[in-house]
Image: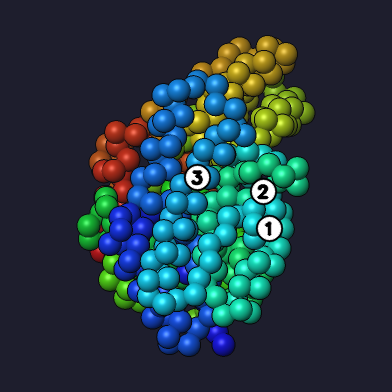
Amino acid sequence: MPLVVQKFGGTSLGDADRIRAVADHVARTRRQGSDVVVVVSAMGKTTDDLIHLADSVSSVQPPREYDMLVSAGERTSMSLLTMALADLGVDAASFTGSQVGIITDGDHTRAKIREVKADLVRDALAAGQVPVVAGFQGVSEDHEITTLGRGGSDATAVALAAVLGADVCEIYTDVTGVFTADPRLVPEAHRINRISFEEMLEMAATGGRVLMLRAVEFARNHNVPLHVRSSFTWEPGTWVVEEDADMEEAVVTAVTHDTTEAKVTVSGVPDRPGVAARLFRALADRSINVDMIVQNTSAHGTTDISFTVPKADLPVSVETAQAHSNELGASGVTSDSNVSRVSLIGVGMKSHPGIAATMFETLANEEINIDMISTSTIRTSCIVRTDDVERAVRSLHAAFELA
Ligand code: ADP
Ligand code: ASP
Ligand code: MG
């Protein structure tokens, strides 16, 4: 029997009607002859609400307690969905991440999955049940409850699909697939029918939050086909698969934007071997995910290094850079959280010169200043002012005729 992992996001489970609609869909998939493993997110804005509650009682928020708190959201939705399935006569059972053996490292609030045991999931399937698993959560080797970072239910779903050898991992959400830009921002954006893991990775890494980055990495590494689709219309959506000849032949596939990062600049850094190594080792030791890095050419034996980090990590990053800058004799550390990133993604960039030039011209025509630039073989990103980023996305989407 084919095996499908179906993951439902927050909006898809937003209220009682939505939960019943999801239960209907799971029941239908079973009737059509597939085994189903369900992975759920917390209902609606539950996770945000829990985080706000934490903010209102504590400025310290020990990470262990944060994970205990936010992992509660998925527990509510898994049991409610299982009850709704019972009403339809579907034999289902809910499980926490810890129960099904989602084993993670101990890095609370952004733990990484180390191993997926899934014994109880296999047992439930063998007994003809539908296992309903709480996404976003796991348990560390020290038996502590952990969470996988925002959007982490996607990672739970893909990891389970990989170890169970599922035929497909379906990600149900509130849009009908992966679009050429965030459809909330660019109404003329269109759905991409098939996209390669490589392009989807770049999209997820640069703000296309429809899929969590780590979930896409996992899917690529284990070759799990992903099908991103709507739980409102149930129509076929976007397939994320290995690159093949059937893919749309656009030079640029999508425009993404990310408003979650901030910029740190260390100026007057002595230009000698080992300086960058020490700075970035210190940041890595504090688990800070540094993204773009730009170093100027040196003048008079010193240089400036700028990099971006998640906004939430800005205070620690500045503190770390400051400690380091004193030690190395740099002249100072500044930061800017009013920056955003706009990126163009497309495998066609490998073979078509001039994409970056058109991107910069388009931004120039809009009088949008570029602060930092970075590229990969299939992506070009610019850091711009946050006030300009929506205009940047719309103008690039139009300039590359993605509508
Ligand atoms: P879920 O709760 O189902 O996981 P998310 O909010 O995490 O849903 O992701 C879906 C949202 O991702 C959409 O509502 C959409 O606004 C946003 N999004 C951003 N970029 C894109 C894109 N390129 N294609 C589709 N959706 C995108
Ligand atoms: N509920 C979690 C969050 O809001 C996980 C998820 O939705 O995937 O981030
Ligand atoms: Mg999500």
Task: Give the mark nearer the N terminus: 2 vs 1.
Answer: 1
Residue 41 place in picture, x, y as percent: 45, 54
Residue labelled with disc 1 = 101
Labelled pair 3, 2 in contact (Cβ < 8 Å): no
Amino acid, disc 2? Val
> Would you say 286 lies left or right of 378 here?
right
The residue sitting at 58% across, 55% down in the picture is: 96
> Which quadrant of the figure contains the C terminus?
bottom left
| Rendering quarter of residue 383 | top left
Task: Give the mark nearer the N terminus: 3 vs 1.
Answer: 3
Residue 370 visible in the shown view: no
> Would you say 343 lies left or right of 222 here?
left
Task: Give the mark nearer the N terminus: 3 vs 2.
Answer: 3
Residue labelled with disc 2 = 139
Q: Residues within 10 Å of mark 1 (few under 14, many from 20)?
A: some
Q: Is residue 2 above or below residue 331?
A: below
> Which quadrant of the figure contains the N terminus?
bottom right
